Image: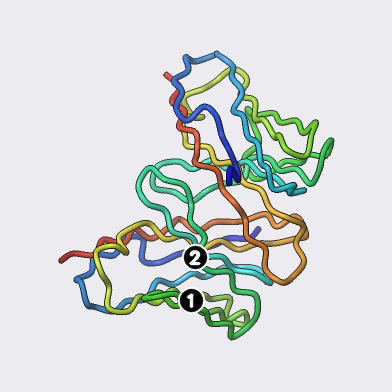
Amino acid sequence: ELKVEQNPLFLSMQEGKNYTIYCNYSTTSDRLYWYRQDPGKSLESLFVLLSNGAVKQEGRLMASLDTKARLSTLHITAAVHDLSATYFCAVGWGATNKLIFGTGTLLAVQP
Amino acid sequence: NAGVTQTPKFRILKIGQSMTLQCAQDMNHNYMYWYRQDPGMGLKLIYYSVGAGITDKGEVPNGYNVSRSTTEDFPLRLELAAPSQTSVYFCASSQLWTGSGNTIYFGEGSWLTVV
């Protein structure tokens, strides 16, 4: 059974600081997604990582994938309040592209 | 730019009632999915479909039914609603996985409360 674990579950950080969210998964997969969800809203796609060593960056967010370790990270650089949200990783599998989600990381950036 | 459209956005049901959550996409995607999100949790797959007339169970299918008569529509039916079905329901769609990275598009969500 494929399991996806994220940590931490809750992260309170000050503006300007750096931090990393970790996503571990239990079975080999060829794709890893990162989503952002604001309260009461739908999911916004951030990154799709497809290969070992893949790194993608958008603004203050950078995601990486290590398929051998079954680990993805989402690194936040110089956090700002606008980044406050819940971040989910999800592992895709099969030709049908079903997703198994982590439990999410609630990020609160304090001024 | 409709994308994935879900209705209704909010609904309160009494225990034992039935209802259908509607989902439509205008991107000609073959694959459609229904997920549920319980408070403070990630999404779990209820059912999915790979094309008109073809559906299959996901992780948590009990208490739900689906049909796919057209490419565009993928309704989710709740029979005999129970409090455990109180959740936020998301419909999603995507193209066939090609290995080069497919965006999965999510609807705005449907908030369902069973009392």
Based on the displayed image, in which of its 4 quarters is residue A26 positioned? bottom right
Q: Which residue is drawn at 41% across and 45% down?
A: A41
Placement of the C terminus of chain B among the 4 image quadrants: top left
Q: How far across and how far down the image is residue A28, in percent? A: 68, 71
Residue neighbourhood size for the residue with mark 2, other residues' Cα within 10 Å, grouped as few (<14), some (14–19), many (≥20)? some
| Residue with the most extreme front position | B1
Left or right: where B59 falls relative to A19: right
Front: mark 1 or 2? 2
Q: How far across and how far down the image is residue A56, in percent? A: 52, 79
Q: How far across and how far down the image is residue B14, in percent? A: 47, 14
Label 1 SS: strand
Q: Residue at x 35, y 75 (%)?
A: A76
Q: What residue is shown with label 2?
A: A46
Q: Are marks 1 and 2 in contact (CB under 8 Å)?
A: yes
Based on the displayed image, in which of its 4 quarters is residue A53 positioned? bottom right
The Cα–Cα distance between marks 1 and 2, rounded to whole angstroms, is: 9 Å
Which chain contains the residue that carries disc 1?
Answer: A
Q: What kind of residue is marked 1?
A: Ala
Left or right: where A44 falls relative to B21: left
Q: Which residue is drawn at 84% across and 35% down?
A: B53
Number of labelled discs? 2
